[in-house]
Image: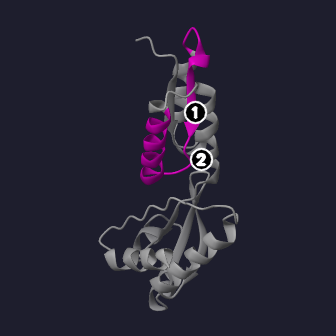
Amino acid sequence: DGSDMVFVIVLAKPLSGTYQSANLARNMLDDSSKVHLFESFSAQVGVEQLVVLLDNLIRQDLPSDVIIKKMQNYIDRSRVLITLSTLKSVIRSGRLTSLQGFIGTVLRVKPLLEVKEGKLEPFSKARTHSKIAEIIVEDMKERLPENVTRIYVRLIDKNQTEIVNNLKSLLEN
């Protein structure tokens, strides 16, 4: 349709057939250099944010190589952390045995998971969501370069507004 470049945002190669399908389709084109694939290494929240960023960059009418560089830089620096209110889903998925899940539930352990290369990896754990929020804020402080004046944090809850509000309060202070 006259477009100079097509950008495609997909999950990581090892996690989804979408990347392989998109790559196969790209390679079927006469000029495959007109399609760029971004591996998001995240799920819905991360992909949504990448789409918003990509849209903003395109609207600035930047050259494709600049858009690619800015997007890749954003992807490389981004993190997705997830905490769970119960251990049910990690027991069902096999990440914890039933015994581990039982002990964790009795001890009220709250896991903090990080999405790394598209996979959920244990990052930390605590007995309360307040402590999880403190761990997140401390980790952010340690990782941020001193010259950073603004960061983008996206907080999403699934009927856990109190947890998100606590984290928001810590981040604002």
Q: How dense is the environment of label 2, judged by Cα within 10 Å: few (below 14), some, or many (20 and up)?
A: some
Look at mark 2 in the image and give the residue it sits on. 75
Residue under circle 1? 67
Is 76 included in the stretch rendered in magenta?
Answer: no
Task: Give x and y (percent) for residue 71.
Answer: 58, 40
On the question of residue 96 being in view, the answer is: no
**Range shown magenta:** 28-57
On screen, residue 93 above or below 54: below
Q: Quadrant of the N terminus?
A: top left
Task: Judge whether residue 33 is colored magenta.
Answer: yes
Vertical order, 124 against 19 (above or below): below
Question: Which amino acid lies under the numbered mark 2 shown in the image of this protein?
Answer: Ile
Q: Can you give x and y, in whole percent of width and height, for residue 99 in the image?
A: 51, 82
Which mark identifies residue 158?
A: none
Query: How far across and how far down the image is residue 11, in percent?
Result: 52, 43
Image location (x, y in percent) of residue 26: 55, 20
What separation in Å lies between label 1 and label 2 (alpha carbons)?
12 Å
Q: Callout 1: helix, strand or loop?
A: helix
Please name the residue shown 70% across and 63% down the image.
Answer: 145
Label 2 SS = helix
Residue 103 visible in the shown view: yes
Marks 1 and 2 in Cβ contact (< 8 Å)? no
* Relative horizontal placement of residue 6, taking residue 63 as reference (left or right): left
Q: Residues within 10 Å of mark 1 (few under 14, many from 20)?
A: many
Residue at 36% from the left image edge and 68% from the top image edge: 157
Inspect the image, locate mark 1, and give the three-letter code of the amino acid beneath it. Answer: Ile
Q: Earlier in the sequence, mark 1 or mark 2?
A: 1
